[in-house]
Amino acid sequence: MAPRKVLAGARVVLPTGIVDDGRVIVEGTRIADTAPAGPATHAETAAAEAADARFMDAETVDVTGHWLVPGFVDMHNHGGGGASFTSGTVDDVLKGVRTHRLHGTTTLVASTVTGDMDFLVQRAGLLSELAEQGDIAGVHFEGPFISPCRKGAHSEELLRDPDPAEVRKLIDAARGQAKMVTLATELPGGIDSVRLLAEHGVIAAIGHTDATYEQTVQAVRAGATVATHLFNAMPPLGHRAPGPIAALLEDERITVELIDDGTHLHPAALQLAFHHAGAARVAFITDAMDAAGFGDGRYMLGPLEVEVAAGVARLVEGGSIAGSTLTLDRAFQRAVTVDGLPVQDVVAAVSANPARLLGVDDRVGSLEPGKDADLVLLDAEFALKGVMRRGEWVVDPQLG
């Protein structure tokens, strides 16, 4: 039997609430139990643990004064550590995954950017192998089925209308590992493509779109369930032409992605989205590119050159924002300390909600017995101090 690990003394964020001086008990790769607060004195604690089979032969780690939360789940991520999920080798992809694990993201979907269809089919094959091995949680295709009016950091000459046959080609190439496709659903074939994705259990995400309010409502009715980085790469909210933003915020079937890096969104826009949609309908994402966890410099995002300066990524030609250098530990800390959001709501946005959308909430996304022992330890100021994935320390708090 694998030795137990007992993480004791932290403020533990459970689905049922926050437990002060709580414990999480790990056995092998799984959470064995979540225990309530222990007795008041060390002598009483020792006596109680000696009489409790859960603590026999256990390694106890004292994490008093810290927060213990579920491992983060990033459903929209293009790379990190100097490596690209769109164009890198298998080793490059694993390097990017490792970089984000060091920042608390224990479950990650690899996102591509617009490219030639044959190239995207090849990437789908490579990434699906890594998903089958458990290194990533699936594949997200962002492009090429997006609007040239709202292309952002995507190559315009490679864009195309969302032909359902081509959408199906990408799904098939991913061998059951396609998790999400971002579409401009107002384009010819958009609604039929949404229906196709819904039928195959793949998330249809509305993004990089120039849709009207009415066109967006039609796409939601057809089965779209996610707004790709809400506010970004779509028409602004207008009082006579509310556009996609109003339609996406008002419909309870839609979960909205938000990039909380201080660059993509004004704090008031984030507050508007978070409080209008509610904590159960927000997923914080990174939309990270190669420079995340790596540094400033010149990078390639697909076929386009990107300059990263002071942590902000922009296209060399045109200056459009080109993804982010965000990691989810920074998003978590900012959401609590700058935006003033409740800790439980932030946990939902970085863990539980994306896990549910991806269909992996039976294994990850919350601290519950039987789930993977994916944990993040934060100090009192919400800075990352430890990361555990499937029962093994990725960032060991005792070595920090």
Image (tube, rainbow, N blue to C red):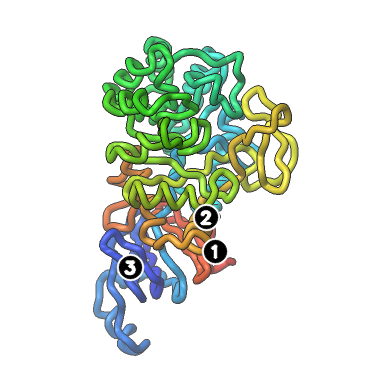
What label sits on residue 18 in the rendered view?
Answer: 3
Q: Secondary structure at mark 2?
A: helix
What label sits on residue 383 in the rendered view?
Answer: 1
Q: Quadrant of the C terminus?
A: bottom right
At a point 46% along the width and 41% down the height, the residue shown is 108
- The reply to whether callout 2 and callout 1 are in contact (CB within 8 Å) is yes
Q: Is residue 372 above or below residue 342?
A: above
The disc, 2 or 3, on the residue closer to the chain's N-terminal end is: 3
- Residue beneath disc 2: 329
Alpha-carbon neighbours of circle 2 within 10 Å: few (<14), some, or many (≥20)? many
CA gap, disc 2 to disc 3? 19 Å
Relative image position of residue 270 (x, y in whole percent): 47, 49
In front: 230, or 135? 230
The disc, 2 or 1, on the residue closer to the chain's N-terminal end is: 2
Say what amino acid the circle numbered 2 marks. Asp
CA gap, disc 1 to disc 3? 18 Å
Residue 396 can be seen, yes or no: no
